[in-house]
Image (spheres, rainbow, N blue to C red):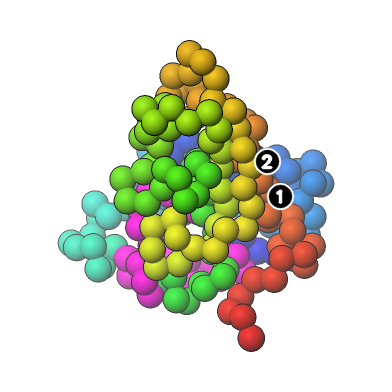
Amino acid sequence: MLKLCVLVSGGGTNLQAIIDRISDGTILNTEIIGVISNNRNAFALERARKHGIPAICVSPKDYENRELFYQALLETVDQIAPDFIVLAGFLVAIPTSMVKKYQRRMINIHPSLIPAFCGVGYYGLRVHEAVLARGVKITGATVHFVDEGTDTGEILMQKAVEVLAGDTPEVLQRRVMEEAEWKILPKIIAMVANGELEIGEKK
Ligand code: GRF
């Protein structure tokens, strides 16, 4: 059984996609054993609770400084003791200590075709605004391992999505989610669960 911990900050539609693909048997031998958010009001936490998944908030607001927050975050993840961590719209830079500890055991979904429109400052709607401003005709989403950089880890899967005339950032964001994010994120998890993608440090 692959034990997953999902880290979220917002609406949690990617979390929902994982829950749904586990429920309908597309992802086998997998259980979400914990959902953690930095944001107490994240709707993603409610989605988790609704499905009987332990949902925990670790908010930076409850800690004196960043260091203590990071320590609490890592301790919370360690207590859950997952095999694999999924960042599904988690808007917190992962501390190096955690990256090291979970090398090749932590993935992120980014709403563009990396290396385009990624890195510091490219998150949420900003990505899609930049795509529209540049006028590219193809965008998409990327699942990658998390390393010390921002969106720099090994790319695992990508899916292209067309940019259409008249798109607003919101419309494009929705299309990228529907056509790419909600598909490739569950797909990678299924591959890990099936042993088709090796995780953990390379021997
Ligand atoms: C998604 O666009 C994801 O790619 C990005 O943040 C957004 C999260 O959306 N990293 P949701 O919370 O899964 O609905």
Residue at the outermost left position: 64
**Observer-nearest residue: 32 or 86?**
86
Q: Secondary structure at mark 1?
A: helix
Residue 202's place in the image compared with 166, above or below, is below
**Observer-nearest residue: 147 or 28?**
147
Q: Residues within 10 Å of mark 2 (few under 14, many from 20)?
A: some
Residue located at (39% from left, 68% from top): 148
- Which kind of residue does numbered mark 2 sit on? Lys
Residue 147's place in the image compared with 108, above or below, is below
Whether residue 53 appears in this view of the structure is: no
Q: Position of residue 1 (x, y in %)?
A: 75, 65
User: Which residue is label 2 attached to?
Assistant: 183
Which quadrant is the C terminus positioned in? bottom right
User: Which residue is label 1 attached to?
Assistant: 187
Residue located at (52% from left, 54% from top): 108
Kindly indicate the quadrant of the structure image that contains residue 17.
Answer: top right
The magenta segment is 70-97
Answer with left or right where residue 161 lies relative to residue 126.
Answer: right
Q: Is residue 61 magenta?
A: no
Residue 62's place in the image compared with 52, above or below, is below
Q: Is residue 91 magenta?
A: yes
Counting the numbered discs, the total is 2
Q: Secondary structure at mark 2?
A: helix
Whether residue 64 appears in this view of the structure is: yes
Q: Position of residue 199 (x, y in %)?
A: 65, 71
**Observer-nearest residue: 74 or 107?**
107
Task: Tell me if the residue at label 2 has its CB under 8 Å from ligand 1.
Answer: no
Q: Position of residue 5 (x, y in %)?
A: 56, 59
Give the distance between the C-alpha atoms of the residues marked 1 and 2, in whole angstroms. Answer: 6 Å
Residue located at (39% from left, 57% from top): 150
- Which kind of residue does numbered mark 1 sit on? Lys
Query: Are the residues at dot 1 and dot 2 in contact (C-beta closer than 8 Å)?
Result: yes
